[in-house]
Amino acid sequence: MEKLKDHDALVKYRKSLESKRRPDMIRVLICTTGCRALGAEEVYKAFKLEVEKQSLKDKLEIVDTGCQGLCARAPVLTIEPMGIFYGRATETDVPEIISRTILKGEIIERLCYTDAGKRTPYIRDIPFYGKQKKIVLRNCGNIDPKRINDYILRDGYAALSKVLTTIKPDDVINEVKNSGLRGRGGAGFPTGNKWEFVKKAVGDVKYIVCNGDEGDPGAFMDRAVLEGDPHSVIEGMLIGAYAIGSSKGIVYVRAEYPIAVEHLKIAIEQAKLLGLLGNNILGSDFSFDLGIKMGAGAFVCGEETALIASIEGKRGMPRPRPPFPATSGLWGKPTNINNVETFANVPIIILKGSAFYKAIGTETSKGTKIFALAGNVKNTGLVEVPMGTTLREIVFDIGGGIPGRKKFKAAQMGGPSGGCVPAQHLDLPIDYETVKEVGAIMGSGGLIVMDDSTSMVDIARYFMEFCQDESCGKCVPCRVGTKRMLDILTRITKGQGKKDDIGLLKELAEVTKTASLCGLGQTAANPVLSTIRYYLNEYEELINKKDAPSLPQESQTTQT
């Protein structure tokens, strides 16, 4: 690879790639990231061997991709340009797929998406994909994330080039502000405002950090983006760095995401070889270097100041604010921190304009949101929908509803820091304000569905156990409050509850929420408060029933 010297060189390079494309080539896209655990790599290798064996290199291209969304059918593959979707494929199915589907155009029914006895071979007809709008996930499942050329062919780094040649830093910030993009890490703070604070902060060195420390049980949104489209995050960070005046960036990602780390390393190296990272990018005065910091997997490091401490080599513990990271962050320098999904939105906003992005979503929550749909729902997987989509649409239209003859009971939104949304709120639009009104938070996008066999008291106990275990212990309200609430919840689930336990839980929850130092403690009580609010009868029944049976534990929240 030769370094691209300027905007024209990037355009010329993209055109040269386009000229080599074979429109008659059939492409088999195989998810080899999340699907890897169920044999996707073996399927991929079987396809490569069969192509070699049958001398099909001129007709068939096998592409290993990131997540294609419908995790419940893993391993999944898509055959283009026909748009055929096959799920739960094995390496023994490969010869038949090639001989019947690819060479003869026949459908293998047993591999098709099936619901209520109806088999659907084409991805366009599968309900799971019908109501989605993919902006952040636009490339996931469509490209090989280890090939920068695949990204460039889909307008990759065009937004960066546009910024460096035609838009001033202040105008980039204004465009992001006008788009209405809010931080997708949980708090929903306006991204453009955050960038502006760092831009105006005094400092000779400024840092930009990508928070990839995704720790919610059942959540895998950021992991999927880093695995399936790392360049979109890198490009978003480059644009942000240009806007705020930063020349150094760090992607903080947990070491428990080895595929994400591997793909990030490859992407950074390839971007450097093309001159898209480093000195004088695309012939401009803008220089930017990017590194990776692997975290040990502490949930509290999702909080900005704890994350900063971890990068600096200290124990990941939050500190009081102010000063905020925007003025005194990493090594005391002005620092901007956004999460993976936030950065991946930025190139599209720059390319298509803030008006395009602003037209999607609700009055106060613009754009789309990714959810990791898990739990007691038929179609578990990765979902991207416009803000304002109802919970009913996600669970029933996209998720396919509840398996068996069970009924929807609740959805845990926002992970351990979120709350349980009951059936009575199925038709409320999901945006930052509405979700907060019903006692939950948007969070990073974890969405765990529960059926009517679920004990909501035990759900509260499970999430409190997680929060108590992940608390750094620095402040007394969180350290002691979560432990005391866990003790009470555990006692209630064992049938040993006392009549004043509910009042004591509410009091402890409010104190922990009000007095804790960071977001972990401030939101840890949400599952308790939301379950008491909507399922008080379950608490009362367990307290009044001293011989309560043992209840299901962690299995209630594991992904199908």
Image: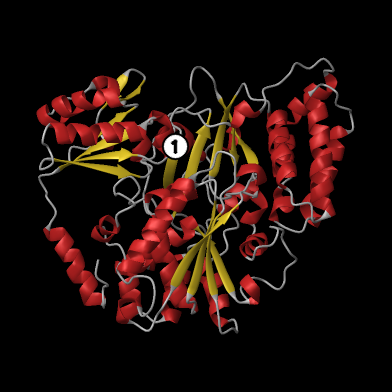
Residue 556 vs residue 175, the one in the foreground: 556
Q: Is residue 560 visible?
A: yes
Q: Which residue is drawn at 17% across and 70% down?
A: 12
Q: Is mark 1 on a helix, strand or loop?
A: strand
- Kind of residue at badge 1: Gly
x, y percent for residue 398: 41, 35
Q: Residue at x 61, y 49 (%)?
A: 297
Q: In this view, does 201 lie to the left or right of 67?
A: right
Q: Is residue 257 left or right of residue 8?
A: right
Residue where numbered disc 1 is placed: 381
Residue 213 vs residue 293, the one in the foreground: 293
Q: Is residue 454 left or right of residue 228?
A: right
x, y percent for residue 504: 87, 39
Residue 281 vs residue 74, the one in the foreground: 281
185 relative to 381, above or below: below
237 relative to 100, above or below: below
Q: Which residue is drawn at 53% across and 51% down?
A: 431
Residue 72 vs residue 316, the one in the foreground: 316
